[in-house]
Image (cartoon, rainbow, N blue to C red):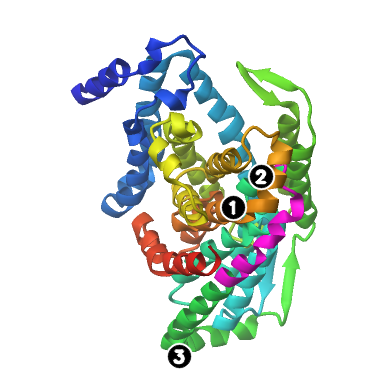
Amino acid sequence: MIRKSIVFTIFISTSPIFASEPGQTSLGSVLPIWSVIPFIGILLSIAFLPLVKPRFWHRHFPKVSLFWAALLAIPLIAAFGSPAWTELKHVILVDFLPFIILLCALFTVSGGICLEGSLTGTPLLNSILLLAGTVIASWTGTTGASMLMIRPVLRANANRKTKAHMVVFFIFLVSNIGGALTPLGDPPLFLGFLHHVPFFWTICLLPEMAFVTAILLAVFFLWDTWLWRREKKDVQADTAPQEKSRRPGLRLSGSHNFIYLAGIVAAVLVSGFWHLPEVNAAGVHIPLQNLIRDCLLLLIVFLSWMTTSRDIRTRNEFTWGPIREVAVLFAGIFVTIIPAVAILKAGEQGALAGLIRAVRTPVHYFWASGLLSSFLDNAPTYLTFFNTAIGRFAPGMPEPLAVGRLICENAVYLKAISLGAVFMGANTYIGNAPNFMVRSIAEESGVRMPSFFGYMGYSLVVLIPVFILTTWIFF
């Protein structure tokens, strides 16, 4: 209790916002760098508590998330007053609720699509499934592709003893790398589209995406082949009787949910084109088209749930556990991440000014946007370096003209920002929205997934060398 009081007092006494009138200074320009401690705290809790206190974690993770959120929110509001309270409401109403509604819609709809049949998880089949998920991710979004493909992958490998590596590479490829080709694929690219980057410009990222995808698929195939051969005798013994009872070929149930999936993609896309007046909700201005989008997504959730038989969802092993876990943990993450994102948005006026000024070359842009996107929301990270590049190469120009000039004369910088934000979301479980969801679904299906830092071990061994090679070849 004494320690909390000390933190509370220091937070208030060192807050320079009191030196200026409210509204004159952005929150990010006055927040100290240590204000990200609650965010680091919740990350460390997610990383360590499941390992050292698994029973405590599974019973009390909502309380842990609430603790870190309150540790940030209460001193922040006390120190900064109205701006902080407005920022909290904005994060909840504009960022978190639309995020979880979209995730819930994709989770519910994909949970009503069941692919069954004589699929045996050989290295070749697994590689084909990962490639298929990677290809469709740019058109349905990485979250949509992940929710659609993860259950068939898990079902095909039900009799494999070692499966964690499959889910890790699934997150690498389907949940992240595959979203690089269109603005539909990943939020940063959609944000770029809203800021006048042509819709099909991102197709020019195909060489880099194909290069990274080819290497990761080759590594996965060799890795999976080694494990497959090691356990082949046991797998054949276990699956032989079961395969006789399976129906030949493949069977798709709940295919009408593909219509709902298309509706989700359309609702998200139209909300980016459609500009309506803003609505004041609890003092936060929300574009009306966003409210309409969220209402449509909730309607799709209801229709999918009512029109899909319970038998299909049972065969799909559908439960609400994964979406509940993601909602609870990301509520804490969205609140505690406020200082980090605000500081990043402040650019050269914030505590990370030195980093922003140090970013000069395409290599710098690729790694700076990428490493920050590994732990922070990749959308504001993308936008920060996007604006930095525009300010450097087209100062003072209107944004549409500035973006055109950047693409014509210095497209490699926009490539570096885009690829860093999309690719390196794969470095951690929290780097991109579907990562944690895929992990939760896999764990609920009985796959023993690596811990937070265990997953980063895969990233350091597999992804980082690939990204270094990508840097050397393309930047």
* Segment tinted magenta in the rendering: 194-212
Q: Residue at x 74, y 36 (%)?
A: 293
Percent x, y of residue 332: 44, 36
Q: Residue 418 carries which label?
A: 1
Q: Which secondary structure type mostly characterizes the magenta part of the structure?
A: helix
For residue 208: magenta?
yes
Question: What amino acid does circle 3 point to?
Answer: Lys
Q: Residue at x 34, y 57 (%)?
A: 453
Above or below residue 441? Residue 164 is below
Question: What amino acid does circle 2 point to?
Answer: Gly
- Residue corresponding to mark 2: 192
Q: How much space separates mark 2 and mark 3, taking CA atoms? A: 51 Å
Q: Residue 142 falls in which quadrant of the image? A: bottom right
Residue contact between numbered discs 2 and 1, judged by CB atoms under 8 Å: yes
Q: How much space separates mark 2 and mark 1, taking CA atoms? A: 9 Å
Mark 2 burial class by Cα count in 10 Å: few <14, some 14-19, many 20+: many
For residue 408: magenta?
no
Task: Please name whichever residue, 457 or 414, is drawn nearer the observer in this view of the structure.
Answer: 414
Residue 262 placement, left or right of 412? right
| SS assignment at label 2 | helix
Above or below residue 410? Residue 343 is above
Q: Residue 312 carries which label?
A: none
Task: Please name whichever residue, 213 or 250, is drawn nearer the observer in this view of the structure.
Answer: 213
Question: What amino acid does circle 1 point to?
Answer: Ser
Q: Residue at x 39, y 26 (%)?
A: 31
| SS assignment at label 1 | helix
- Residue corresponding to mark 3: 233
Q: Residue 91 falls in which quadrant of the image? A: top right
| SS assignment at label 3 | helix
Q: Does the image show residue 298?
A: no
